[in-house]
């Protein structure tokens, strides 16, 4: 139902949708961090199911989510599907948090990515994913949005933090299988997210809260771990899923779709499923706060050297093969007019593939590089150095 509801809005937005251009990003500078004894921060991530028009009980649920965040005394929340200005206002008001950042894109419903914090936001940025759903499957709705990755920067007790928020393409079937028909798109989105983090971070301390739309056993989740090397919350036990009963909106489990990833200089002190509360609505019904459960984690500085390291080279070569193979599905057959949407998707795949090839050239050759390639190689090597310190 969610996909059909979003899809109704695609037709009106498609005519005004604009192309996505890579932003000019500031150079990253790794800072030496001196953690004080007992330093920590708390992060929540939550898909709040605030779709325009169709999501039920938005005002009551968004207000209640705001109150729930206020009770948890968090340092930051990375929220997804917060697509209405009224919903963001009600949630922020309930949370009583001082600062917020939302990321819009002309011609779309917006990103739905909303970050809130009691700290002063020093910088923010956003990258809408290149591969964004299929035009002819308008009922799915992803094409109407600007899903992507966003970030804010703030300081907690003398430590600069880079916080990222992300939402990838939805699954519409095969929920617990390792892959589905949109796996190549999600792999491309995760690569762009990694690229965004490597390019924009200027602190060794960073964290990502996200709706991956991918369970722990998925190809996408394994690709993310191999590409980034980041410790990522994988819950276990009876409360390991985030899209499942007893949520009042959900009939069957789709696994743990929501995750928190942290930099090598940080460690999880606590992480658990959260936002399991229900509210009694004006309609006289008990309802969950959202169709997802969220996560809340206490993050501390890491004392020991992290042993896990990313295999960037293996991961991006695999993605290159995946995207080259995927192109064959979108090669024009007959007249281009017979295939609306296919030519554009082909160009989107080629755009990401070009960036992947650029990565391979930059991080593997190390010689005779262009200034842009040298800058990228430096940033990747600086990222890898975090796993050795």
Image (cartoon, rainbow, N blue to C red):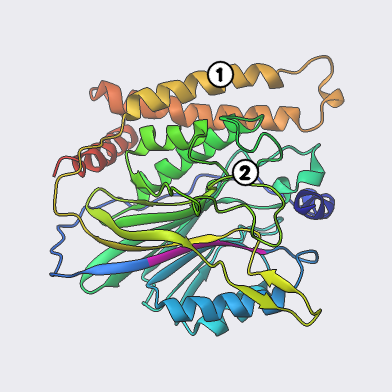
Where is residue 377? Give x, y as percent.
28, 34
Q: Which residues are magenta?
A: 43-49
**Between 332 and 97, the one nearer to me in the picture:** 97
Residue that numbered label 1 is attached to: 324
Name the dominant secondary structure of the magenta segment: strand
Q: Is residue 45 magenta?
A: yes
Where is residue 204? Give x, y as percent.
24, 54
Q: In the orientation shown, which residue stands out farthest toward the right?
A: 338
Q: At numbered mark 1, what does the secondary structure look like: helix, strand or loop?
A: helix
Residue that numbered label 2 is attached to: 169
Residue 149 appears in the picture as rendered: no
At horizontal 19% and vertical 57% (from top left) the residue drawn is 31
Where is residue 128? Give x, y as percent.
56, 49
Number of other residues with Cα within 10 Å of mark 2, as a class: few under 14, some 14 to 19, many 20 or more: many
At horizontal 40% and vertical 27% (from top left) the residue drawn is 315
331 to 303, vertically: above or below? above
Where is residue 200? Give x, y as percent.
36, 51
User: Which quadrant would the C terminus be assigned to in this image?
Assistant: top left
Q: At numbered mark 2, what does the secondary structure look like: helix, strand or loop?
A: loop
Q: Is residue 181 magenta?
A: no
**Between 280 and 120, the one nearer to me in the picture:** 280
Q: Is residue 371 left or right of residue 152?
A: left
| Disc assigned to residue 294 | none
- Viewer-nearest of labels 1 and 2? 2
Q: Is residue 341 left or right of residue 29?
A: right
Disc 1/disc 2 C-alpha distance (Å): 20 Å
Q: Is residue 28 left or right of residue 5?
A: left
Residue 99 appears in the picture as rendered: yes
């Amino acid at each position: 139902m969610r996909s059909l509801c979003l899809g109704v809005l695609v037709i009106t937005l498609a005519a005004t949708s604009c192309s996505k251009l890579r932003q000019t990003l500031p150079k990253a500078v790794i800072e030496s961090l001196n953690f004080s004894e007992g330093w920590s921060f708390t992060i929540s991530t939550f898909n709040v199911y605030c779709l325009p028009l169709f999501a039920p009980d938005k005002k009551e649920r968004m207000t209640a989510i705001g109150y729930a965040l206020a009770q948890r005394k968090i340092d930051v929340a990375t929220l997804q599907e917060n697509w209405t200005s009224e919903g963001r206002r009600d949630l922020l008001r309930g949370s009583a948090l001082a600062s917020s950042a939302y990321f819009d894109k002309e011609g779309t419903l917006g990103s739905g990515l909303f970050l809130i914090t009691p700290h002063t936001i020093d910088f923010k940025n956003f990258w809408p994913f290149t591969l964004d759903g299929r035009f002819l499957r308008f009922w799915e709705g992803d094409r109407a949005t600007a899903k992507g990755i966003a970030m804010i920067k703030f300081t907690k007790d003398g430590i600069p933090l880079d916080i990222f928020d992300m939402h990838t393409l939805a699954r519409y079937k095969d929920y617990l299988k390792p892959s589905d028909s949109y796996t190549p798109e999600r792999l491309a989105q995760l690569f762009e997210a990694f690229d965004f983090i490597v390019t924009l971070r200027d602190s060794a301390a960073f964290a990502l809260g996200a709706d991956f739309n991918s369970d722990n056993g998925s190809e996408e989740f394994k690709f993310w771990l191999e590409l980034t090397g980041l410790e990522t919350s994988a819950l276990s036990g009876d409360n390991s899923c985030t899209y499942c009963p007893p949520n009042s909106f959900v009939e069957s489990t789709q696994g743990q779709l929501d995750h928190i990833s942290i930099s090598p200089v940080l460690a999880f002190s606590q992480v658990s499923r959260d936002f399991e509360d229900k509210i009694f609505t004006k309609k006289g019904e008990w309802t969950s706060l959202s169709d997802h459960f969220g996560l809340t984690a206490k993050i501390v500085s890491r004392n020991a050297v992290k042993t896990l390291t990313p295999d960037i080279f293996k991961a991006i070569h695999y993605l290159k093969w995946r995207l080259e193979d995927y192109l064959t599905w979108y090669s024009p057959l007959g007249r281009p007019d017979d295939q609306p949407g296919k030519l554009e998707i082909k160009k989107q795949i080629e755009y990401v593939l070009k960036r992947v090839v650029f990565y391979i050239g930059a991080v593997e050759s190390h010689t005779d590089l262009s200034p842009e390639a040298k800058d990228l190689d430096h940033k990747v090597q600086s990222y890898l150095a975090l796993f050795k310190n």
